[in-house]
Image (cartoon, grey):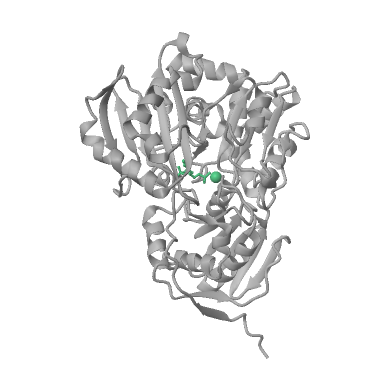
Amino acid sequence: MTVSLSPVQTIATKPFADQRPGTSGLRKKTKVFQQPHYLANFVQSIFASLEGFEGKTLVVGGDGRFFNREAIQIVIKMAAANGFGEILVGRGGILSTPAASALIRAEKAFGGIVLSASHNPGGPDEDFGIKYNISNGGPAPEKITEAIFAHSKTIESYKIVEAPDVDLDALGETQVGRAKVRIVDPVAVYLKLMESLFDFPAIKQMFGAGFTLKFDAMSAVTGPYAKAIFEEALGAAPGSVVNAEPLPDFGGHHPDPNLVHAKHLYDLAMSAKAPDLCAASDGDGDRNLVIGRGQFVTPSDSLAIIAANAHLAPGYKSGIAGVARSMPTSRAADRVAEKLGVGIYETPTGWKFFGNLLDAGKVTICGEESAGAGSNHVREKDGLWAVLMWLNILAARKQSVKDIVRAHWADYGRNYYSRHDYEGVASESADALIAGLRASLPALPGQSLGALTIAAADDFAYHDPVDGSVSKQQGVRILFADGSRIVYRLSGTGTSGATLRVYIERFEPDLAKHDLETQAALAKLIAAAEKIADIRRHTGRDEPSVIT
Ligand code: VG1
Ligand code: CO
């Protein structure tokens, strides 16, 4: 008698109207995802938007947040039912976003599904998310995310294998339906990749000589990676990595490594007990925070400094092909690219826009003002990569973070930069503010606000130089005659109401003026930003909820 392979069931369902992926996948309140069929509908819509995966490999993992394990079981059973031949899952359901990208590439997988709402808080009353990555390891481009959304609006059924849950904690292989499920070490492939890029012996020597690090994994996904890399491979003192165990609710914290949610690190870095380097990563491990003793490094500056120094790391010793940054990111990196004589590209917000440039070999280093940096080693931003890059630069230059940042400003000038977020604004009010800005665009050039004169104003549209696709309405830009900028856009990662982001930048070439407090240095522009967009009237807020 033959045992029938677990039968594929076709389950009838009805569409949910709200499954349009945002800046980085679909993010909703966990309770929304827990509704019957909600996750399954989206997963089926992903598969319906792909072609040619029969018998191929799918990588699956998540950031460990509440509902991660349940979601992974559903994804495994649906991938098997839809015809994937092999499903690779990080042990415990864990894979950081960059590690998932690395695994997709190393295993030549067809694609991957990452369960994460990234820097959004987790737990039964917080956020959950899911995103699909293509075979280059990067986020699905808009063509695919729009197809997923289109399918989700008409879906009538999904396929799932009836099978017992897979033991996610035991390395090895099992069979689910006709697919092989392989539970793999989530760290191994990633660690090997990092060893190939950075001078581990030099960094190890630096730690041996007493260099001190405090890395906060924020009870999110990077703990196991950071322990293995910093403490075990590089010899950082035990305890250098804190909050190293991924927790379903991130210990009740907001796993966003910014100056609000990681203020304790900032305070430590500014204190008498400051280690040489303080660093952190977000929920899914793709963002980074870097603070030297007495010196915070803005993500925009970090991108520029990494671009200028990447050649010091073995993986980049022959130089970089080019740099890409998201449009709102400061133009500090542009000056480096110019000096190096390499290309600089300006893309819309979100890592999915870097994939084509990286695949085409036009750029090596990419970054966003939102604490994201990465390179052509994967197709996602990579928090630990950024910290390792800094460690490598510090080991090679034998200078402090502070000295390196100061020297960079002295060479290139300083781009004062800040982002003001207005969170939880009513969607209609936020939409009205943006609509008002768009309507005012033609009349803005030539207007003066005090000493500032508006030279140009537009709604950023991106023309992808590789595939020719066009993405419109990616942020309203106000460009001033002195080179300063204000950018307005609405967040595409929130799960309740709208978040208005206002990005403010001013270039200061004068070395004698590199020590101003950032908000003070930008005060005139901040006032102009209010005036141009009428933020107070539209949002009812007197000040931003988060300043980074
Ligand atoms: C934000 C950031 C953006 C980043 C995105 C995903 O998007 O601004 O730069 O790529 O989050 O990061 P938005 O649409 O909210 O501004 V993560 O760490 O959530 O994957
Ligand atoms: Co993230």
Above or below for 135 versus 294: below
Outermost residue to the bottom: 1
Measured as percent of width and height from the top left, residue 119 is found at 56, 45
Above-or-below relation of 269 to 373: above
Number of labels in the image equals 0
Image vertical order of residue 379 relative to residue 198, above or below: below
Residue 322 appears in the figure: no
Image location (x, y in percent) of residue 72? 61, 63
Residue 297 visible here: yes
> Quarter-wise, where is residue 8 in the image?
bottom right
Of residues 31 and 425, the one drawn nearer to the viewer in this rendering: 425
Image coordinates of residue 339 in percent, x first then y, are 39, 22
Specify the farthest residue to the right: 238
Q: Toward the viewer: 469 or 12?
A: 12
Q: Residue at x 53, y 65 (%)?
A: 39
Relative to 221, is 268 above or below?
above
- Left or right of 41: which side holds 100? right
The quadrant in which the N terminus is found is: bottom right
Q: Relative to the observer, which residue lies in front, 50 or 27?
A: 27
Q: Is residue 184 left or right of residue 106?
A: right
Q: Which residue is situated farthest in the top direction here? A: 512
Counting from the top left corner in percent of width and height, residue 547 is at 51, 31
**Residue shown at the point (54%, 20%) measured from the top left:** 405
The structure residue drawn at horizontal position 42% and vertical position 58%, both measured from the top left corner, is 20
